[in-house]
Amino acid sequence: MRPKPPAGTELARLDEIPDPGARAAAWEKGAVLLVRRGSDITAWSNLCPHAGLPLTLPDGRGLLHKGETLVCPVHGASFDIEDGRCTGGPAAGDRLVPIAVKVTGGVIRAV
Ligand code: FES
């Protein structure tokens, strides 16, 4: 289990996240994964429920397929970025742990 950011924690600027795309926030060594589609951001604890490893590459990038499916770089489990549900691969039946965020003035903060 990775730590959850306290309410109000600044995680990133919106323009730091590719659109569409996914990137770990710098907070707590990448403990939060931010996924962007346009102005919509979803955030997840950056741990794959399969083997408890990061969902991001060593440089912090997340792998987003067709702008809607997050793919774990370790063994290829896929996750719906709307609800965190595993949609294929070795984490079937599991889901990502959501982190509540909001975007205000181009800044993504925990709520
Ligand atoms: S650690 Fe993510 S699929 Fe195995």
Image (tube, rainbow, N blue to C red):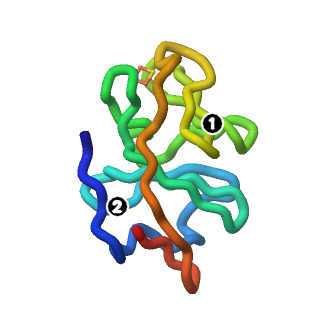
Residue 38, relative to residue 61: is it above or below? below
Pinpoint residue 50: horizontal percent, then vertical percent. 39, 21
Pinpoint residue 80: horizontal percent, then vertical percent. 63, 36
Residue depth check, mark 1 versus mark 2: number of the one nearer the observer: 1
Seen from the viewer's position, the closer of residues 7 and 33 is: 7
Q: In which quarter of the image is residue 55?
A: top left
Residue tagged 2? 26
Q: Residue at x 46, y 60 (%)?
A: 100
Q: Which residue is drawn at 40% across and 68% down?
A: 110
Q: Residue at x 38, y 74 (%)?
A: 10
Give the alpha-carbon distance from disc 1 to disc 2, as whole Å.
Answer: 23 Å
Residue 42, relative to residue 54: is it above or below? below
Q: What element carries label 1?
A: strand
Q: Quadrant of residue 99?
A: bottom left
Pinpoint residue 101: horizontal percent, then vertical percent. 48, 65
56 relative to 6 in the view: left or right: right
Residue tagged 1? 80
Quadrant in the picture for the C terminus: bottom left
Amino acid type of disc 2? Ala
Amino acid type of disc 1? Asp
Q: Is ligand 1 less than 8 Å from the beta carbon at label 2?
A: no
Q: What element carries label 2?
A: loop
Pinpoint residue 56: horizontal percent, then vertical percent. 44, 40
- Marks 1 and 2: CB-CB under 8 Å? no
